[in-house]
Each structure stands twice: as structure tokens, then as C-alpha cells.
Amino acid sequence: MTLTMRMSDEVADAVAGGAPVVALETSLVSHGFSRGLGLAAALESEQRVRAAGAIPATIGVLDGEVRAGLDRAALERFAEAGSRARKVGARDIAACLVQRALGSVTVGGTLAICKKAGLRFMATGGIGGVHRGFAQTLDISADLMQLARTPALVVCSGPKAILDVAATSELLETLGVPVLGWRVPTLPMFYTAQGGPPVPAVVTTGMEAAAVAAAHWELNPSCGLLVARPPLNGMDLGELVTKAVRQVRAAGVTGQEVTPAVLARIEELSGGRSVAVNRALIADNAGLAAQIAVAFTASR
């Protein structure tokens, strides 16, 4: 079987013409929010990318093909499917294609497709990483390894708060992935800017981030990098996160189901406050990724 990738006309024209494009994932649409709020988050992210002068390329697997640049009808399919859509990392794309399943791609899955399509910029909420208690479970997200072998810049708000953020930072260093703090000297912790380990470098403008990316790819053309942007109106949910992780673990949830289960529990425990922060930071990250992509394109 030949892998079929279909870009929308808009995305294909942008790629062919060297215009700035920002890749967006679909796992947040189907698995990241309850009550269909993922659709609103996806549409707002696309709008923020356009407002900054770039083209959004939301990516998913539908009807036996990879598609980059989904229309609203396709996004609605993911939102309506919810957890019935397959959560697709890089390892899962081939099976999803052959079996013609509806596949919502994770950060790692999106990056694998970015590598195939030649897309250099991506935005998300938080990346996967080293899970708490990893020494017993070896539960480490494939997002990190895929980032280490994909020449793309990912804007996020740090690792998801449910993770061992310090251990994730250490593994990123081991993998040679630069982590740039967006106007902050420490790695954001998703819901809050405070409490994370120091970052190796801070950037303050889109042009500066783009210049670091260009230099990095001259030195290591196959490796990605992170720009970690803190949430503007974050909140300290540390105790709630710890409680949610403990409850989900006690329920025996494992593998790819851990993150959506913990996020749903955090939403319940916070009375919905976590959702507002999550939606805002996803949109803000999309806008920043577009800003950096535009600066990178202008400098070529």
C-alpha cells in the first residue's frame, strides 16, 4: 500500500510557494476536551494562525488517507467521534490507514506527518513526556523521540501538567532537543508558568526564535526544538493534578488512555476552570507558532 497524503488546496499552494504553514493536531479535538469543546478550540487555533499571517494545516487520518488542512466538516467528525476516534501516534498511522479508521493524531503523530510533508512549525497545548512513576512503568511519551528526529519547531506550554516535568526536561536534554523559554527562564508547567526547571535559553521575539531554529537546523538538520510559552492567565492546580493522577492510576487506566482520563478528572475537580486555561493557551500557542513561522519565512 502506498501512503496517501492529501493536502487541501490552500495548504498545498502554501507549501509549494514557500509560505508559512502551522501544523495542528486533532487529538485535542476528539480526546482533549469534553462536550465537543475540542471543535471550538481547533477553530479558534486556526483563526489565530490566520490572523498572524500563516496557513493552518490541521492534520488527521480519514478514510484511508492522511489529510493536512481539514475543513469544518472533517473537524466535526473528530469532535462527534470523541474517544471513539483512534488516538494515533507515529507508530499507529500505518495501521490506521490500512484499516481506514478515523485517526486523531497526537503531537508525535502530527510530527511524523510534518516530516513527510515538509512542514516546519507546529502548535499544541502541552507535549507528552515522562510520566510520574516512570521507573516502575517505563511510561514515556513517544512525542519526545519523534521530536528528536523531526526538523520542526513546536510551540507548547511545556509538558502536560500530569507528567514528571523535571524528568521530561532531562530527557529532552539527553535527546539534544533545544528548549526555548518564551520570555521566561523556567519551563512552564502547562496550567502555570511557575515551578518548572530552568530552560537553557530564553527568546523574546518571533524573529529571535526563528533565527535559533535556523541555526539549529544547520547544525542538526533532523532534530526539532521547543518554544515553551507560559499561559497568560494560568492557575496553580498542582494538588488537583496529583489527586487526579492518583485516582486514574487506582482505576487501572494505562497507556494512551491515561492523559484524557486525567484531564477529564482535572476538569471535574476544578469545576471547569482547567478547561478555560487549556483553551486559551492552545489558541495563544497557535498564534505564536504562526508568528515564528512568518518570521522564519521572511528571513529566507
Image (cartoon, grey):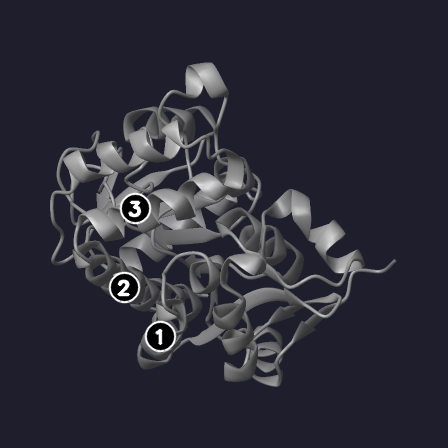
Q: Is residue 229 visible?
A: no
Tell which circle, 3 or 1, labels the residue nearer the N-terminal end: 1
For the residue pair 225 and 82, the one nearer the viewer reads as 82
164 versus 210 height, above or below: above
Element type where label 2 sits in the image: helix
Residue pointed to by mark 2: 279
Q: Residue at x 75, y 66 (%)?
A: 64
Tell which circle, 1 or 2, labels the residue nearer the N-terminal end: 1
262 versus 246 height, above or below: below
Element type where label 1 sits in the image: helix
On the image, the x and y values in percent for residue 23 come to 49, 64
Front tag of 3 and 2: 3
Residue that sits furthest to the front in the current view = 251
Residue pointed to by mark 1: 40
For the residue pair 212 and 105, the one nearer the viewer reads as 105
Q: Which mark is residue 265?
A: 3
Q: Which mark is residue 128?
A: none
Q: Residues within 10 Å of mark 1 (few under 14, many from 20)?
A: some
Q: How many marks?
A: 3
Residues at circles 1 and 2 in contact by the CB criterion of under 8 Å: yes
- What is the three-letter code of the residue carrying label 2? Arg
On the image, the x and y values in percent for residue 72 come to 50, 82
For the residue pair 246 and 191, the one nearer the viewer reads as 246
Quarter placement of the N terminus: bottom right
Residues at circles 3 and 2 in contact by the CB criterion of under 8 Å: no
212 versus 121 height, above or below: above
On the image, the x and y values in percent for residue 271 come to 17, 55
Residues at circles 3 and 1 in contact by the CB criterion of under 8 Å: no
